Amino acid sequence: MAPTISIPDSRMGDILNGAKKVSFTPTQRKLIEHMIRSGNFDVLLNTLKGFRNGVIYGARVRFPHALVLNLVWSKAPYHAMPGKILQVTKTHALGLGYSAVLFAVVRGALQALTGRISLWHNTLAGFLIGFFFWGDPENGVHLQMIMYKMARVLFVLYRVLAARLKLTAPRYGYALFAGAVWATSLTLMEGSPNSLQSTMQSSLEYIFLDKKMK
């Protein structure tokens, strides 16, 4: 039997407030409150709320990003831009929504099987999310997501290891690292430009190689 979890009042109110436009009788409202407090529907509620949050967050982040990139860098005609912007926004939003669904299902299932939440539940859920929803190397949104996360994960791993091993960074360690990153990017810009991600290639060439006065 799955463990019963008490739902905080704040969370219950948040869930119920999401349905303000729906008219409930006192009996129906009491039944809904009982269902939420029982903990028996945690996976379902987490899945629905996670999907909603993922879609909203993905749309908020991707739409303005895609709009700016298309206006600044895209060579496509203006009438074709709305379709491209909506497509990448949809990909990003649904990808995060589905990721939240899989996370809730995996964690809920493993918690029911083991009787508790463990760190490796997150690890497994994260691997499955990346494999199934962000693993297409031909999809620009997927590539951008992984590059975004990889850079931040590597920074965090360095800080965690440094703290645990009590390592002290050299005085100019960060400056040397920044120099190495810029040296690599500008070398690739000249020696192998097509290997760079398209927006990075465009921005570097515009800043450093395009000398035309417009």
Image (cartoon, rainbow, N blue to C red):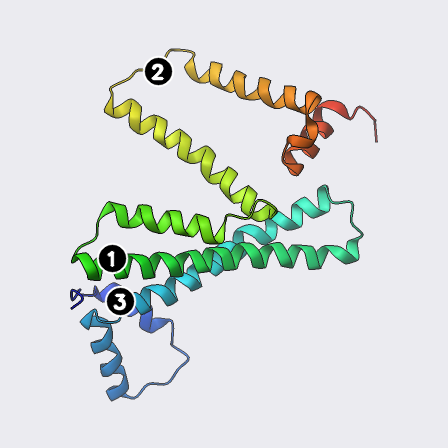
Q: Is residue 39 above or below residue 104?
A: below
Question: Of callouts 2 and 1, which one flags the residue occurring earlier in the amino acid sequence?
Answer: 1
Question: Of callouts 2 and 3, which one flags the residue occurring earlier in the amino acid sequence?
Answer: 3
User: Disc 1 marks which amino acid?
Assistant: Leu
Q: Where's residue 10, x and y in %?
A: 25, 64
Q: Is residue 155 above or below residue 170?
A: below
Question: Of callouts 3 and 1, which one flags the residue occurring earlier in the amino acid sequence?
Answer: 3
The numbered disc on residue 88 is: none
The residue indicated by pointer 1 is 110
Disc 2 versus disc 3: distance between alpha carbons?
A: 44 Å
**Disc 2, SS:** loop
- 131 relative position to 158: left or right: right
For the view shown, which residue lies furthest in the top direction? 171
Decide which of 87, 60 is in the foreground and name it: 87
Depth check, mark 2 against mark 3: the one in front is 3
**Disc 1, SS:** helix
The residue indicated by pointer 2 is 169
The residue indicated by pointer 3 is 42
Q: Where's residue 144, x and y in %?
A: 55, 42
Q: Neighbour class for label 3 at 10 Å: few (<14), some, many (≥20)?
A: many
Q: Quadrant of residue 13?
A: bottom left
Disc 2 versus disc 1: distance between alpha carbons?
A: 39 Å
User: Disc 2 marks which amino acid?
Assistant: Ala
Disc 3 versus disc 1: distance between alpha carbons?
A: 13 Å
Which residue is pictured at 24% across the width and 25% down the height? 164
Q: The C terminus lies in which quarter of the figure?
A: top right
Which residue is pictured at 51% across the width and 47% down the height? 135
User: Disc 3 marks which amino acid?
Assistant: Asp
